Amino acid sequence: MGFALRVAVAGDEQSVCELLRRSIGEGCAQDHRDHPEVLENWLSNKTPNNVRNWLGSPSNYMVVADSGNALLGVALLNQAGKLALCYVDPGTTRHGIGRAMLAAVETQARSWNISKVHLHSPASAAGFFARLGYADGGKEKACYGLECDLYWKPLNTQPGDCPADSRARFCNCKA
């Protein structure tokens, strides 16, 4: 499956919004279980206007995976080190899109001198983040009412910098 990563630009708002809503509605169905209140809360800020605001903020970095015909993925990192969005079109999972976007936002985080990236992951995506070196810091309730796992990953570390069991919620490694 061919795609190119690029920084999201003005004009992507509608496509990003549609991708987010489809990914959450379909791809995260096992998480929200079609519970109307949870789904409504989760989708409530996924509007073209909010996406436009996210794009326009200099403290955000948004990358998209573009097939040339459609957006296949979107990820958003803020300068506080929070990965606020990381979604892939449900029909295109397991093609390296999420992995490529995550590598791009981690590169941006390093350029901003961010030492750790953190995120809330629903159960359906937890294995993905764990496979890519993110440590599970335990359960937390996300702002939209779904219990999620808090994941984090130290950046700019070398092998051996962290203790053998670096899955502790707060690591004192050299990151």
Image: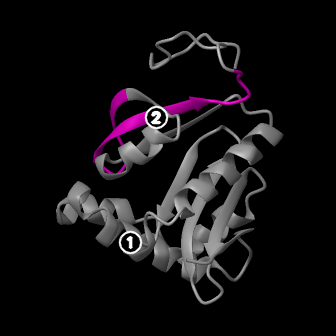
Q: Residues within 10 Å of mark 1 (few under 14, many from 20)?
A: some
Dividing the picture into quadrants, the one containing residue 71 is: bottom right
Quickly name the residue at label 2. 151
Q: Is residue 116 magenta?
A: no
Q: Position of residue 85 (x, y in %)?
A: 53, 56
Q: Position of residue 138 (x, y in %)?
A: 35, 27
Q: Are marks 1 and 2 in contact (CB under 8 Å)?
A: no
Q: Earlier in the sequence, mark 1 or mark 2?
A: 1
Q: Residue at x 47, y 79 (%)?
A: 18
Q: Check the image and report above or below for 132 versus 13.
A: above
In magenta, the rendered stretch is 138-158
**Which three-letter amino acid code belongs to the residue tagged 1?**
Pro
Q: Residue at x 31, y 61 (%)?
A: 28
Q: Is residue 151 magenta?
A: yes
Under tag 2, what secondary structure?
A: strand
Q: Position of residue 15 (x, y in %)?
A: 56, 81
Q: Describe residue 40's horizontal placement relative to residue 68 as left or right.
A: left
Q: Residue at x 82, y 41 (%)?
A: 111
